[in-house]
Image (cartoon, rainbow, N blue to C red):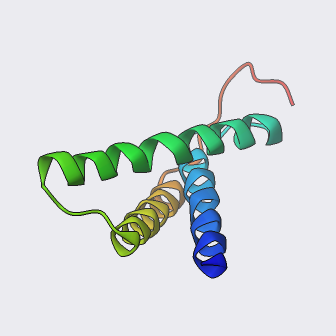
Amino acid sequence: MVLQFVIGGALFLATGWAISLAFFREADVVERVVFSLACAMTVPAIILAFLNLILKIKLDAIVVYVVLIAVTAASFWYSKTQPQRHHVGKHS
């Protein structure tokens, strides 16, 4: 039970961090943490709701882990394949 909590929490945080890296490239540390938590709570929840309500897939721990791993991998892949954007007017 404790192991499932630790693995689930780590996947939850990794998913949010990966999504924030993919879509919020210019965020500083505080913004990244906020975006990570917001994305971790919303994106997997929407996907899991779609799987359960529309596709009628029964949700259990394995399905949730697979969705979290797939979203994390897709987000990291997307963030690595997109070119770095340079914004004019942003001061360092």
Locate residue 29: give its quadrant: top right
| Quadrant for the N terminus in the image | bottom right
Locate residue 88: give its quadrant: top right
Q: Considering only vertical position in the picture, is 82 above or below 25? A: below
For image coordinates 61% across by 61% down, the residue present is 14
| Quadrant for the C terminus in the image | top right
Between 41 and 32, the one lying in front of the other is: 41
Residue extending farthest front:
1
For image coordinates 81% across by 37% down, the residue present is 30
Q: Position of residue 51 (x, y in %)?
A: 22, 54
For image coordinates 58% across by 59% down, the residue present is 12
Q: Is 73 positioned to the left or the right of 56 in the image?
A: right
Q: Position of residue 84 (x, y in %)?
A: 59, 47
Q: Is residue 23 visible?
A: no
Q: Is residue 87 visible?
A: yes
Q: Position of residue 71 (x, y in %)?
A: 42, 60
Between 37 and 53, the one lying in front of the other is: 53
For image coordinates 48% across by 52% down, the residue present is 82
Q: Considering only vertical position in the picture, is 72 above or below 45? A: below
Q: Position of residue 25 (x, y in %)?
A: 63, 41
Q: Considering only vertical position in the picture, is 3 above or below 53? A: below
Residue extending farthest right:
92
Locate residue 63: give its quadrant: bottom left
Residue extending farthest top:
89
Q: Is 52 positioned to the left or the right of 82 in the image?
A: left
